């Protein structure tokens, strides 16, 4: 699994953190089997039979996922901090395998519609 993490500190009070994780997985099935009418048989060949479903139903799969997180932290006074957070996720699952190599697959991640979440967090230090 590949991941990218970076932090940029502009000043002691201001920083930017970024994290990204792409995930690409492809698979194809060959020789799928199912339990036969005699699942307790002593021989393996008698316990399982060739899967009766159409070949197109068992071709394989293609899974694409991308997660990223960006945080801007600003300490506007000692002990008091303001956070701006942007989280993005992209995901697609298909029942057909993708035969391209990883160089053709990774750019597809950015064609998937993203789910974006924006958050703001404020912490204030009460000095007594």
Image (cartoon, rainbow, N blue to C red):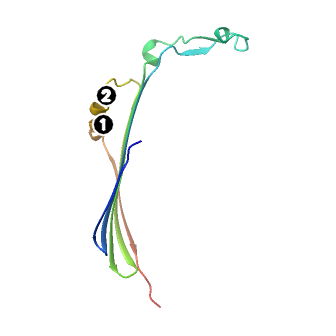
- The one nearer the camera, 93 or 32, is 32
**What residue is shown at x 38% (from left), y 73% (from top)?**
122
Of badges 1 and 2, nearer the viewer stands 2
Seen in the picture, residue 85 relative to 68 is either above or below; the reply is below
**Quadrant of the rendered image containing residue 56:** top left
**Where does the image place residue 63, in percent across and percent down from the top left?**
40, 33
Residue at 45%, 18% in the rendered image: 57
Instruction: Identify the residue at horizontal 30%, vertical 36% (top origin).
Output: 106
Q: Residue at x 70, y 10 (%)?
A: 43
Q: Residue 58, relative to residue 46: is it above or below?
A: below
Which is more toward the observer, 53 or 28? 28
Q: Image quadrant for the N terminus? A: top left
Residue 67 picture location, percent across and down: 37, 47
Q: Residue 119 carries which label?
A: none
Q: In which quarter of the image is residue 44?
A: top right
Q: Where is residue 68 in the image (x, y as percent from the top left)?
A: 35, 51
The kind of secondary structure element at disc 2 is loop
Sequence-wise, the earlier of marks 1 and 2 is 2
Mark 1 = which residue? 106
Q: Is residue 87 in view from this perspective? A: no
- Mark 1, residues whose alpha carbon is within 10 Å: few (<14), some, or many (≥20)? some
Circles 1 and 2, Cβ within 8 Å, touching? The answer is no
Give the Cα distance between marks 1 and 2: 9 Å
What residue is shown with label 2?
A: 101
How many numbered marks does the figure carry? Answer: 2
Which element carries disc 1, helix, strand or loop? helix
Answer few, some or many: residues within 10 Å of disc 2's Cα (few below 14, many 20 plus, some between 14 and 19). Answer: few
Q: Position of residue 7 (x, y in %)?
A: 32, 61
Residue 10 in view (yes/no) = yes
Seen as rendered, the residue at the extreme bottom is: 128
């Amino acid at each position: 699994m590949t991941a990218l993490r970076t932090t940029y500190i502009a000043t002691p009070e201001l920083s930017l953190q970024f994290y990204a994780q792409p995930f690409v997985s492809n698979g194809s099935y060959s020789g799928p089997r199912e339990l036969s009418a005699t699942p307790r048989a002593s021989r393996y060949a008698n316990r399982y039979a060739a899967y009766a479903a159409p070949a197109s139903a068992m071709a394989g799969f293609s899974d694409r996922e991308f997660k990223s997180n960006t945080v801007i932290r600003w300490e506007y006074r000692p002990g008091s901090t303001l956070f701006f957070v942007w989280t993005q996720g992209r995901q697609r699952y298909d029942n057909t395998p993708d035969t391209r190599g990883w160089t053709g697959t990774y750019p597809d991640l950015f064609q998937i519609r993203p789910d974006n979440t924006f958050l703001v967090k404020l912490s204030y230090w009460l000095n007594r």
